[in-house]
Image (cartoon, rainbow, N blue to C red):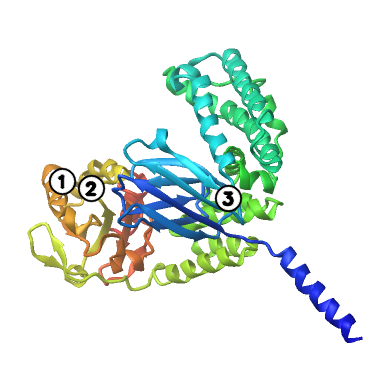
């Protein structure tokens, strides 16, 4: 009897070992002529991001809990896509001064990544100049895109080095690339031909109508499939908004919540809510939709934490404070120094393109409300090392109002308290220091004047 029990235990242990799934990748490498301190890995849908430190001699090593599929790798201004497969160990090596020519892969799955490099070169050769490609008429474009698809399918079919599982997924990915090109043609052709009114014929997109948008395996593997799913969500949202009085972000989240595939639904819900929850005008409705639809405990935990922080800066709550921010005159200003008037706060930076677009509109609004019961406060989150750059822009653009430099850029407590993840961000505070809205309309939006009128400013 003891022998039988012992045998069962041994079998159980062996069975457990056999079924053990390694959900991580051992990733290492060596960078010659290294200058940057970090290597960044990011998934195309923003659900994964990791920063790997580079040692002084250019080597790096990390264990990544990462999904199978291609991820974007960036090193300074250099970037490429690399295929990761759970349970493998591999390394990437390159010379920062000669990136493309020296990029090599070693380890357990170098063949897939070598294939992707060769494919990228072949695809660029077949497409030629992008503007010329998208300037082709409908028939010419579709014919050329189909030739590219068929050429790449022949290449992957005759490849003897990649795994069969990768090959089957890649064949579908190549087809999605073709469909993605077709779906991008209308806007790209209108832009390259300077014909903004251009519309494709009804037959042109016939192939796209047959796509199954709810394939979780293809979603995880193919960035082209992800883009097609994103376009499906955008199209469905636009369609529903026409007969719906709800805000666009609420409608879009509802569209995603209806996706029947859990992998796709959870990924898109998180991708949307990670930043979207910080901008929504209806926090309770937004969070409720997300929380009821998401089944991923990690994603739910993070978004719930963000929700709890945002409740603290809801309408009517006392505003978080800032203390002793340096002003343009070289002195300091604190939040409490400005109480007694409405405060329209602009969180911006000199490197932010959308922030610069708002500058002329902000100057116009500020002039219109000069001597009114409102103070215009601009808080730059430029780094302290860029203080001179900030001052020069304030002077060059002749920016008015109260110009301040935050103490720790993105890590400034005021910025973190408002959970600001993107700029420009505009905040409106009442004379008592309470929040009217943590997501005020931009100066370029007519609704800002409507809000000021409603408050009788």
Numbered tag placed on residue 350 in the rendering: 2
User: From where the camera sits, is residue 329 visible?
Assistant: yes
Q: Position of residue 389 (x, y in %)?
A: 15, 48
Q: Position of residue 310 (x, y in %)?
A: 43, 67
Q: Nearer the viewer, residue 132 or 369?
A: 132
Residue at screen point 60% across, 67% down: 297
Residue 278 versus residue 211 in the image, above or below: below
Q: Considering the image in quadrants, where does the N terminus appear? A: bottom right
N-term mark: 2 or 3: 3
User: From where the camera sits, is residue 281 visible?
Assistant: no
N-term mark: 2 or 1: 2
- Nearest to the eye among marks 2 and 3: give it: 2
Crowding near pointer 3: few (<14 within 10 Å), some, many (20+)?
many
Q: Whole-Å distance between the Cαs marked 2 and 1?
A: 7 Å
Numbered tag placed on residue 393 in the rendering: 1
Q: Nearer the viewer, residue 409 or 256?
A: 409
Q: Position of residue 234 (x, y in %)?
A: 57, 41
Crowding near pointer 2: few (<14 within 10 Å), some, many (20+)?
some
Q: Considering the image in quadrants, where does the C terminus appear? A: bottom left
Q: Which residue is mark 3?
A: 251
Q: Whole-Å distance between the Cαs marked 3 and 1?
A: 39 Å
Describe residue 41's horizontal placement relative to residue 167 as left or right: left
Q: Helix or strand or loop: what does disc 3 sit on?
A: helix
Describe residue 10's horizontal placement relative to residue 280 as left or right: right
């Amino acid at each position: 009897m003891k022998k039988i029990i012992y045998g069962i235990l041994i079998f159980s242990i062996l069975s457990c070992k056999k079924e053990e799934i390694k959900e991580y990748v051992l990733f290492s490498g060596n960078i010659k002529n290294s200058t940057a301190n970090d290597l960044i890995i990011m998934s195309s849908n923003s659900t994964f991001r990791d920063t790997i430190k580079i040692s002084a001699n250019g080597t790096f090593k990390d264990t990544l809990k990462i999904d199978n599929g291609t991820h974007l790798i960036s090193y300074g201004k250099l970037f490429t896509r690399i295929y990761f497969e759970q349970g493998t160990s591999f390394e990437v090596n390159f010379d920062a001064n000669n990136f493309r020519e020296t990029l090599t892969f070693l380890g357990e799955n170098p063949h897939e990544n070598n294939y992707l490099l060769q494919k990228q070169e072949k695809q660029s050769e077949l497409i030629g100049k992008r503007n010329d490609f998208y300037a082709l008429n409908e028939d010419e474009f579709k014919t050329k895109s189909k030739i590219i698809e068929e050429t790449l399918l022949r290449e992957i079919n005759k490849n003897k080095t990649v795994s069969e599982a990768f090959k089957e997924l890649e064949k579908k990915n190549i087809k999605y690339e073709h469909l993605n090109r077709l779906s991008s043609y209308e806007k790209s052709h209108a832009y390259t031909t300077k014909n903004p009114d251009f519309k494709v014929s009804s037959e042109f997109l016939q192939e796209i109508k047959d796509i199954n948008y709810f394939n979780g395996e293809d979603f995880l593997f193919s960035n082209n499939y992800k883009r097609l799913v994103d376009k499906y969500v955008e199209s469905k949202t636009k369609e529903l908004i026409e007969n719906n009085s709800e805000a666009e972000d609420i409608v879009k989240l509802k569209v995603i919540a209806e996706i029947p595939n859990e992998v796709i639904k959870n990924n898109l819900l998180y991708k949307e809510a990670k930043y979207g929850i910080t901008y929504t005008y209806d926090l309770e409705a937004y969070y409720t939709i997300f929380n009821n639809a998401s089944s991923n405990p990690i994603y739910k935990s993070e978004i719930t934490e963000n929700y709890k922080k945002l409740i603290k800066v809801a309408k009517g709550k006392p505003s978080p404070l800032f203390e002793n921010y340096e002003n343009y005159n070289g002195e300091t200003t604190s939040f409490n120094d400005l109480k007694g008037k409405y405060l329209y706060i602009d969180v911006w930076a000199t490197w932010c393109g959308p922030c610069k677009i708002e500058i002329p509109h902000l100057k116009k609004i500020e002039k219109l409300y000069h001597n009114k019961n409102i103070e215009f406060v601009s808080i730059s989150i430029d780094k302290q090392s860029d203080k001179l750059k900030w001052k020069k822009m304030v002077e060059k653009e002749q920016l008015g109002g109260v110009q301040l430099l935050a103490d720790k850029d993105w890590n400034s407590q005021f910025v973190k308290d408002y959970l600001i993840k993107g700029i420009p961000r505009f905040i409106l505070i009442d004379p008592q220091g309470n929040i009217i809205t943590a997501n005020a309309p931009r100066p370029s939006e007519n609704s800002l004047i409507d809000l000021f009128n409603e408050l009788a400013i």
